[in-house]
C-alpha cells in the first residue's frame, strides 16, 4: 500500500496539480487545467496557510501525496468565503401557488429563483482523486481531511459551510439542464460558460439570465429529472459529505442544476467527535476501525489514515506515521483524531 498524506499545498506542487486538472473534464468550475490560474491559486493558498491575507480572502488548497512516489494524486480545498468579490449565483427552488375558488382549482408550481443567498459562506470545492487511487479509504481521507482542518481552526470560518456538487451529465458529456435552459440565454455551449465562470468573468450571468422566477414545469422532462442530481462520478463525494452533517436545502447550480449541500460549521461531525491527543512513540494495537489523524499546525497541516486506539488523552503512533504528520523528534506532539467512518447509531 502506498504511503499517503493529505497536506497543505506548496509552490512546487504546481506541475502535479496541473496534471491532475487535465484529467477532470468539464463541470468542475473551481479546478480547470489553466497553468496561470492554478499558479495564482497556489500563491493565494500558500499565503492563506501562512496567515498573510485576511481570513475572508483565504483559499485553503490541499493535495494528497503518494510519498514514496513523490507524486500528487489528489486535491481538495476550502474557500473561506464566497461571493464577497465576485457574485456567487445559485438557483433557489421555491413554490408558487395558483388557486381559483370559482373553478375549485389549486395548483402548486416549483420555481427557480436566481439568488445570491449563499454569499459569505465557506465552500468545500475542487475535490478530485486520481483514478488509480480510487481504492480503499483514499477517497474518504481526501474528502474528510478538510473537516479536520475546520475542526482545528473553527474560528477562521463563517457560520455556514456549503459544497456545490457537480451536476448530472449524460455519458456523452451533455448537460440536459444546460441544454434546456442556460443555452437559450447565453448562446454558448456548457463548457464555454463554465470556463468563463472559472476565470471570474461572471457579470454575463446577471446580464443575461432572467431575474423573474422560472417555472420548472416549463422545462423538458429530461431537464426536470436532473435538478438536484449529481454527476455519476460525484455520487460517492455527496454521500461522504452527507455523513459529515451536510444536507441539501433546495439550492442548485445555475448551469447544470447540481445540488448545493449546506451545514452549520458547529454541527459538523468533526466539531463534535474529534479530540486532541498527545503523541507517544510505538506501534498501536490494531483498531476496530481506522481513524483520521491530523497535525495541529496550520502552515504545514497534514492528515493521514491510521489504525490507532486513542486512550486517556494519548495516542500511539509509529515513527513512520509521525514522519508523515511532520511531528517533531520524540513524544509530546499534539494531534487531532477522529474515527474515519461515522459511528452507526444503535437506533438506525
Image (tube, rainbow, N blue to C red):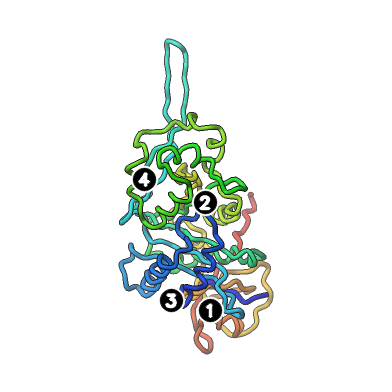
Label pair 3/1, CB-CB below 8 angstroms: no
Q: Residue at x 45, y 11 (%)?
A: 103
Label pair 2/4, CB-CB below 8 angstroms: no
Say which of 42 and 323 sits in front. Answer: 42
Q: From where the camera sits, is residue 153 visible?
A: no
Mark 1 or mark 4: which is in front?
4
Mark 3 or mark 1: which is in front?
3
| Sequence-first tag of 2 and 4 | 2
Mark 2 or mark 4: which is in front?
4
User: What percent of the width, then of the height, locates residue 138?
Assistant: 61, 66
Query: From mark 3 to mark 1, how far is it between C-alphas?
Result: 19 Å
Q: Which residue is mark 4?
A: 205
Is disc 4 placed on a helix, strand or loop?
Answer: helix
Say which of 147 and 286 sits in front. Answer: 147
| Sequence-first tag of 4 and 3 | 3
Is disc 3 placed on a helix, strand or loop?
Answer: helix
Q: Which residue is mark 3?
A: 11
Query: From mark 2 to mark 3, how far is it between C-alphas?
Result: 27 Å
Q: Residue at x 56, y 82 (%)?
A: 322
Q: Residues within 10 Å of mark 1 (few under 14, many from 20)?
A: many
Q: Which label was assigned to residue 161?
A: none
User: What percent of the width, then of the height, locates residue 43?
Assistant: 38, 72
User: What percent of the width, then of the height, locates residue 247?
Assistant: 51, 49
Q: Which residue is mark 2?
A: 166
Q: Which label was assigned to residue 325?
A: 1
| Sequence-first tag of 1 and 4 | 4
Q: Which quarter shows the N terminus?
A: bottom right
Amino acid at each position: 500500500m502506498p504511503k499517503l498524506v493529505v497536506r497543505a499545498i506548496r509552490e512546487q506542487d504546481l506541475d502535479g496539480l496541473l496534471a491532475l486538472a487535465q484529467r477532470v473534464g468539464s463541470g468542475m468550475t473551481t479546478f480547470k487545467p489553466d497553468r496561470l490560474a492554478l499558479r495564482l491559486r497556489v500563491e493565494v493558498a500558500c499565503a492563506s496557510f501562512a496567515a498573510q491575507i485576511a481570513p475572508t480572502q483565504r483559499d485553503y488548497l490541499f493535495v494528497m501525496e503518494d510519498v514514496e512516489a513523490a507524486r500528487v494524486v489528489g486535491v481538495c480545498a476550502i474557500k473561506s468565503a464566497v461571493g464577497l468579490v465576485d457574485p456567487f449565483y445559485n438557483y433557489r427552488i421555491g413554490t408558487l401557488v395558483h388557486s381559483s375558488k370559482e373553478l375549485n382549482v389549486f395548483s402548486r408550481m416549483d420555481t427557480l429563483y436566481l439568488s445570491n443567498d449563499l454569499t459569505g459562506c465557506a465552500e468545500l470545492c475542487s475535490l478530485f482523486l486520481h483514478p488509480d487511487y480510487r481504492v480503499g479509504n483514499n477517497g474518504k481521507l481526501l474528502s474528510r481531511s478538510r473537516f479536520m482542518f475546520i475542526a482545528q481552526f473553527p474560528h477562521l470560518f463563517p457560520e455556514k459551510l456549503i459544497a456545490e456538487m457537480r451536476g448530472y451529465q449524460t455519458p456523452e458529456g451533455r448537460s440536459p439542464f444546460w441544454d434546456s435552459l442556460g443555452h437559450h440565454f447565453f448562446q454558448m455551449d456548457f463548457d464555454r460558460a463554465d470556463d468563463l465562470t472559472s476565470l471570474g468573468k461572471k457579470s454575463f450571468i446577471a446580464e443575461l439570465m432572467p431575474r423573474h422566477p422560472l417555472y420548472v414545469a416549463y422545462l423538458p422532462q429530461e431537464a426536470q429529472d436532473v435538478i438536484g442530481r449529481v454527476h455519476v462520478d460525484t455520487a460517492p463525494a455527496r454521500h461522504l459529505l452527507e455523513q459529515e452533517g451536510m444536507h441539501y436545502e433546495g439550492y442548485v447550480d445555475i448551469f447544470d442544476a447540481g445540488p448545493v449541500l449546506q451545514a452549520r460549521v458547529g454541527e459538523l461531525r468533526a466539531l463534535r467527535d474529534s479530540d486532541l491527543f498527545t503523541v507517544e512513540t510505538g506501534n498501536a494495537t490494531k483498531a476496530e476501525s481506522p481513524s483520521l489523524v491530523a497535525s495541529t499546525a496550520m502552515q504545514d497541516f497534514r492528515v493521514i489514515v491510521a489504525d490507532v486506539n486513542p486512550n486517556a488523552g494519548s495516542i500511539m503512533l509509529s515513527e513512520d506515521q509521525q514522519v508523515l504528520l511532520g511531528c517533531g523528534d520524540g513524544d509530546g506532539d499534539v494531534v487531532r483524531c477522529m474515527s474515519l467512518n461515522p459511528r452507526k447509531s444503535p437506533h438506525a
